[in-house]
Amino acid sequence: MKIRKDAFAPKPPMGWNSWDCYMSTVNEAQLLENARWQAEHLLPFGWEYCVCDIQWYEPTAGTKPGMEYIPFARLNMDEYGRLLPAENRFPSSAGGRGFAPIAEQIHGLGLKFGIHIMRGIPKQAVFARTKVKGTDATADQIADPNSICLWNSDMFGVRKGLAASQAYYDSLFELYAGWGVDYVKVDDIAHTGPAESGGYDAAHEIEMIRRAIDKCGRAIVLSLSPGPAQIGKAWHLSQNANLWRMTNDFWDSWPQLKKMFGYCELWQTHVRPGCWPDCDMLPLGRIGVAFGHGRTTNFTPAEQKTMMTLWAIFRSPLMLGAELMSLDDATLALLTNEKVLAVNQNGANPRQIARDDGHAVWVSENEDGSVNVALFNLGDEAREVGFDFAEIGWDEAACDELWTGEGLAGARISAKIEPHGAEIWHCERMA
């Protein structure tokens, strides 16, 4: 059964991902504790995906202080070279049940379940010459030993043009569909390979994954990481994936956040249903808990509002990485502002109107003819930022600021905004 790709993610996906908090060490208890909190406090506002990030198949992850990945660690794998949850970290997976028991619990909470995978086939499977399910081929015959991840030692890429390579990916997504997976984040694929190659060496694997999803009979959202994705590959990305990272890993640094405005400018014309250029996760709340380095986000309250405002008006996917049980009231208020979230979920044609080193202005449109206007102070001092409605052919508008509820009317909106701060306005045309 083939389902139209656009139907998989008609709006930007919203959810929680374990990476920012637990990195490679997440376990079943942590995953489900966050899922229960998410279902109670965030699901009513649309945060529906619960995603288990990298190395859930690695039994020793987190046992060497400070090491995100242990080189050439022994992985949990089935007879077809398909990785399985490490039973010491995910005990409900014992007996070959995989993630099915966890997916069932997460679905029972009203959430959708996602996992992270690395592209390719485990090196462990290649050295063991495991069978490729449904074929006479073995893992070593489909692996490309020259295609490796530069930061993780687990996998080889798979060869292009082999029926057995496609069969391998088909077998993966057959497995994930059987578990009840709704979302797959594939890593080392949106930007991979040496710099001189242009960073898009795995295009054939993206296509194989697309075909495997289309065959598996389940609507699985496809997310590609890491960035920066190439704007020159926008058509190929949009034909195969639902979301793709515009950047490398994004963390709680003002220079990184300010740089994101450039990425959004570059990708703004490619935002549409089923195709979501991705600003990356929201490093809010308590993060970095793995390896004993837990901390509260370095973003100031103004910067947190700027991040949420940009992600909302650009229509980036919204993936939170915090330890949910530790969220404070101020952070929760940012995440549950229904009017701001509606801009993200329902706005259309997001576009930058102005930007220099000190400020930026963005606009998007609503079905009823109203518009959303976001004003950003990118400078280190308070400054006035404004927008003239003549820019969109209007004479005057009545507006409400969505964070504060403040109202105004006229031919222009203008506000003195704190350093690194933002406002977002909902505006209706006046006759």
Image: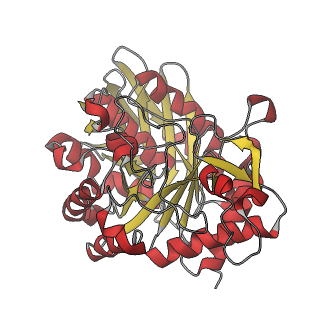
Residue 164 in view of the camera: yes
Residue 413, quarter of picture:
top left
Residues 293 and 271: in front is: 293
Q: Is residue 148 left or right of residue 152?
A: right
Residues 235 and 85: in front is: 85
Q: Is residue 109 above or below residue 76?
A: below
Name the residue rendered at 33%, 76% in the picture: 104
Q: Is residue 354 left or right of residue 325?
A: right
Query: What is the x, y in percent for residue 248?
Result: 55, 35
Quarter of the image containing the N terminus? bottom right
Q: Is residue 154 left or right of residue 379?
A: right
Query: What is the x, y in percent for residue 207?
Result: 73, 61
Name the residue rendered at 53%, 65% in the picture: 221
Q: Is residue 416 above or below residue 318?
A: above
Q: Is residue 233 left or right of residue 189?
A: right
Query: What is the x, y in percent for residue 390?
Result: 54, 40
Quarter of the image containing the C terminus? bottom left
Name the residue rendered at 60%, 78% in the picture: 216
Residue 240, quarter of picture:
bottom right
